[in-house]
Image: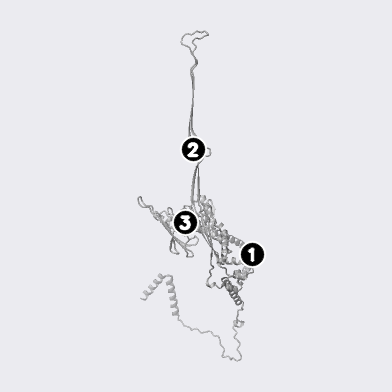
């Protein structure tokens, strides 16, 4: 602190000697330096943003953004592109793989990993470089998954063969090492297999082998058939746990009650398709393709006389007969095409319904004994402490079992389409206690801890042990504080200065010690010896700096001596 104060005083003294213009110049330089540091911090603290999944459709992009938001990965959407920090890209891909939000063709994610290829490379070299880059990229991404420490990916993708030869499908092997050395979860195995299979065209999930490097075991990813079985098992386990939890909450007032639930779940997926013909006017129509209409009419000629000269008198004896008959005909033709309307309805029922529920409840005998003792008269002290017989407990058991069954039955009901109503079995079990706890009740009574207090010997031991640990901790802390408060014995001023202690009266001084300088042994050197040593030092320096020149000088000396 004193050195800092001295430095500040020196700076203050130097600044006081400066003129006003010099002070303004220093202030300007300080402001410029601060702004420069601020800009450097802004640009240096902002990571480079890279595109996560190029070429994504709108729905796939929305799915990716939602998964990144749930995983808490920082991202931005610019011009229809999803951008993430460059150092968080592998973590983002791992989170997308675990969440099942990767695009259908995840090979698009690695389309730019070999952009630095040279045009001088052959096709085989470029293919090998692409495969190695893809393997490294997949390994880095898998290593970012939860619980995974590192991973190694190997992909074998045979080149297309000629006509007539057998087609070899690509295969892959992934070795996964966990953080804590435990086994890899099935969920991680499925995510790794799906991620690797989607990154290589033509690679199926069945051809991906996942090796647990921590336990040296081979793991198989879940297929379609296994997924149905796994779904059924998980659904059954979920239903049993949920129903058992409800029953335990319902019967929490019974100490030592045991509840077991067996569920049968139908997880078969049912698809129903129905096709119905619609009536006329509601979907069915008749359309006229063409219409033809024709009409024909015919009538006979008027009256006429015989040929020759006629009289011009009023009476005409050659009057002809009446006019002939008329004929009319009409014809129409139309070409029609009927269109029948259909209504198709497809229903996909994932089901997952519970078809059967069985619950078995074991009630300890002490519960029925307690109910029997409660039914005894209040003034009968001997009856309250007496041990009932089986005949005495039989009415209590029948009544309590019927009541428990009625309470539990609504919780194990199944839907109407199930195989039948749930079954509830309630039975009494004997109270069993280890030999070490046989005297628990007597010791508890001796300590004043009755059965109704709910305090048992194991609970008492835990309480005493915790209290002892607390007391030991307090004692250690008090001891530490006590040692810390003890004054440190510092040397006196006489001891620091070096004043000799006072000689007591009964002691006599033997002599005085004097401080003298020790004499060093001197060696007298002649001028020739000094010159020789200087020359030796110069030769050594010349050898270190320029060995060639030193060799030439030595050769000259040797030649001169010869």
The residue to which callout 2 is attached is: 339
The residue to which callout 1 is attached is: 19
| Disc 1 element | loop
Q: Measuring from the top left, give residue 114's x and y in whole percent.
A: 44, 55
Is mark 3 in CB contact (under 8 Å) with mark 1? no
> Within 10 Å of the Cα at label 2, are there few (<14), some (14-19), or many (20+) other Cα atoms?
few
Q: Is residue 468 above or below residue 328?
A: below
Which of the two discs, 2 and 1, labels the residue nearer the N terminus? 1
Front residue of this view, candidates 495 and 419: 419
3D distance between C-alphas at marks 2 and 3? 46 Å
Which of the two discs, 3 and 1, labels the residue nearer the N terminus? 1
Q: Which disc, if any, is residue 396?
A: none
Q: Measuring from the top left, give residue 210's x and y in whole percent.
A: 44, 59
3D distance between C-alphas at marks 2 and 1? 103 Å
Q: On the rendered structure, is 10 left or right of 110?
A: right
Q: Is residue 349 above or below residue 4?
A: above
Q: On the rendered structure, is 394 left or right of 207?
A: right
Front residue of this view, candidates 152 and 408: 408
3D distance between C-alphas at marks 3 and 1? 88 Å
Q: Is residue 534 above or below residue 118?
A: below
Q: State the image quarter where residue 158 is shown.
A: bottom left
Task: Check the image and tell me how it is coloured.
Answer: one colour
Which of the two discs, 2 and 3, labels the residue nearer the N terminus? 3
The residue to which callout 3 is attached is: 229
Q: Is residue 172 visible?
A: yes
| Disc 2 element | strand
| Disc 3 element | helix
Quadrant (top left/top right/bottom left/bottom right) for the C terminus: bottom left
Front residue of this view, candidates 7 and 285: 285
Name the front one of labels 2 and 1: 2
Is mark 2 in CB contact (under 8 Å) with mark 1? no
Q: Is residue 114 visible?
A: no
């Amino acid at each position: 602190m004193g050195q800092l104060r001295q430095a500040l005083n020196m700076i203050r003294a130097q600044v006081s000697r400066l003129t006003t213009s010099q002070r303004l110049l220093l202030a300007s330089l300080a402001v410029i330096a601060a702004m420069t540091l601020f800009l450097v911090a802004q640009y240096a603290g902002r990571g480079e943003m890279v595109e996560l999944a190029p070429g994504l459709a709108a729905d796939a992009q929305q799915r990716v953004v939602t998964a990144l938001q749930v995983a808490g990965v920082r991202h931005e959407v610019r011009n229809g592109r999803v951008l993430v920090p460059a150092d968080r890209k592998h973590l983002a891909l791992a989170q997308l793989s675990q969440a099942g939000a990767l695009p259908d063709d995840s090979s698009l994610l690695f389309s730019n990993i070999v952009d630095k290829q040279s045009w001088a490379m052959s096709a085989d070299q470029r293919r090998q470089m692409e495969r190695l880059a893809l393997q490294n990229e997949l390994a880095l991404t898998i290593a970012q998954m939860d619980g995974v420490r590192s991973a190694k990916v190997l992909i074998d993708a045979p080149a297309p063969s000629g006509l007539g030869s057998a087609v070899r499908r690509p295969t892959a092997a992934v070795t996964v090492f966990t953080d804590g050395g435990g086994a890899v979860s099935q969920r991680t195995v499925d995510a790794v297999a799906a991620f690797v299979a989607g990154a290589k065209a033509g690679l199926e999930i069945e051809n991906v082998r996942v090796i647990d490097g921590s336990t040296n075991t081979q793991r198989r990813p879940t297929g379609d058939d296994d997924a149905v079985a796994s779904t059924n098992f998980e659904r059954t386990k979920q239903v049993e746990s949920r129903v058992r939890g409800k029953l335990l909450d319902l019967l929490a007032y019974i100490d030592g009650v045991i509840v077991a639930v067996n569920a049968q779940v139908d997880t078969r997926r049912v698809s129903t398709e129905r096709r119905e013909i619609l009536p006329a006017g509601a979907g069915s129509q008749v359309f006229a393709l063409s219409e033809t209409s024709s009409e024909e009419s015919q009538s006979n000629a008027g009256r006429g006389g015989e040929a020759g000269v006629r009289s011009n008198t009023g009476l005409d004896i050659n009057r002809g007969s009446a006019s002939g008959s008329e004929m009319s005909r009409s014809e129409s033709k139309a070409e029609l095409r009927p269109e029948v309307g259909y209504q198709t309805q497809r229903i996909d029922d994932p089901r997952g319904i519970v078809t059967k529920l069985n619950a078995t409840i074991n009630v300890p005998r002490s519960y029925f004994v307690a109910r029997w003792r409660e039914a005894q008269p209040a003034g009968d002290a001997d009856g309250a402490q007496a041990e009932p017989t089986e005949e005495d407990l039989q009415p209590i058991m029948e009544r309590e079992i019927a009541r428990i069954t009625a309470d539990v039955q609504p919780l194990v009901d199944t839907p109407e389409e199930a195989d039948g109503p749930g079954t509830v079995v309630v039975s009494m079990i004997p109270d069993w206690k280890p030999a070490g706890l046989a005297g628990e009740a007597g010791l508890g009574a001796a300590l004043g801890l009755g059965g109704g207090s709910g305090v048992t010997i194991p609970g008492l031991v835990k309480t005493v042990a915790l209290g002892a640990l607390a007391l030991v901790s307090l004692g250690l802390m008090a001891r530490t504080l006590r040692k810390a408060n003890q004054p440190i014995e510092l040397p006196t001023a006489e001891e620091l200065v070096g004043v000799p202690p006072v000689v007591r009266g009964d002691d006599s001084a033997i002599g005085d010690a004097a401080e003298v300088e020790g004499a060093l042994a001197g060696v007298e050197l002649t001028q020739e010896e000094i010159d020789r040593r200087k020359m030796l030092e110069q030769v050594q320096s010349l050898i270190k700096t320029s060995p060639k020149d030193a060799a030439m000088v030595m050769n000259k000396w040797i030649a001169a001596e010869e």
